[in-house]
Amino acid sequence: MPSGPDLPAIDGDEAAAISGRLLAWYDRYRRVLPWRVLPGAVADPYRVWVSEVMLQQTTAASVANAFERFLARFPSVTALAEAPLDRVLHAWQGFGYYARARNLHRAAGIVAAQGGIFPDSEDGLRALPGVGAYIAAAVAAIAFGRPATVVDANVERVVARLFAIRTPLPAAKPAIRLAAAALTPPDRPGDHAQAMMDLGATVCVPRGPRCMVCPLAGQCRGLAEGIAGELPAKAAKAARPVRHGIAFWLAADDGSVLLRRRPERGLLGGMTGLPTTAFRERPWSLAEAAAEAPVAGPWQPLAGTVVHVFTHFALELTVAAGRVARADPALGLWATPDGMRDHALPTLMKKAVRHALAETDVRR
């Protein structure tokens, strides 16, 4: 069993007792979620995979209804593979991180080409686009009964408190993973993984953990030492850098506005939106941006900026307005403001459109 300077040895009997208590609690108090099956039953790998991709950076409560709508549109991995990417991206609106939807579509194509049969091992699953260690372990454990160690933010919190791991995240991740692996049972590993997630989501919550009703309170070293609520500790975050860009609101006399699909690789890859400059550390002048504008000016900067926060940086986007007599298809896609809802615009672009509409008289 693992041990180290911040992780006391975990006895095999202790690990078995913890897992047993956790599974008994799960059998009685598990969350009912649309992608789950009854304890001990075999889950559909397609449903597990889609749900886990959706759950990244999102809560189960906000995913449940969207998952049902997505599965209604794409009821099987073959249906997802055969759907146009634009339809998949449109169905993905509201989740952000659109690279996940593109990878979902690509991976569906690979699985469909293999007769719709998913790989049943972590290594095989990780070979699919967009499938990392966490999703591979989750699908392997929940859908195929593999004794894979599934570690998300909920599991990290439960394990850090259970074994009083004081090292701040992310440095604590290796110790937490070792401890989580020690707890993973050979039988019902999928139920065990979901029980750990449920415990973290409903009892061992980030603030004010409900230790009085926790099935593992008697084994929790963090509770015994009076530090459970302080764990897991987190290292101080570096300040998020700010980048700048210009979006071009080019309106034709018929009221339509120019849209373009962004390159597949890079931020918002493959998404439709207003043409923009690159996003960089220093602000753009209109003179500098002219080379990246869809047509020659004149361009009029609109008052104010659009602010959007990505994972690794904040963006301040200026919108510059221009006009042309006719909508030239050679420049890209054209849509009226009302018609833009038919396109999969990411949140940033929706903000830019709202800002432009508020500052121009393009809607007539």
Image: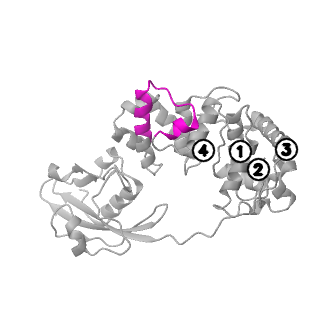
Locate residue 287, reporting x and y percent: 21, 75
Q: Earlier in the sequence, mark 4 or mark 2?
A: 2
Dot 3: element: helix
Q: Which residues are magenta?
A: 104-128
Dot 4: element: helix
Q: Earlier in the sequence, mark 3 or mark 4?
A: 3
The residue wearing badge 4 is 60
Q: Earlier in the sequence, mark 2 or mark 1?
A: 2
Q: How is the image coloured?
A: one colour
Distance from Cα at disc 3 to Cα at disc 4: 30 Å
What is the quadrant of residue 146 in the picture? top right
Locate residue 212, reporting x and y percent: 84, 51
Dot 2: element: loop
Distance from Cα at disc 4 to Cα at disc 2: 31 Å
The residue wearing badge 1 is 181
| Mark 3 or 4, closer to the camera | 3
Q: Residues within 10 Å of mark 2 (few under 14, many from 20)?
A: some
Give, as a three-letter code, the residue at label 4. Answer: Ala
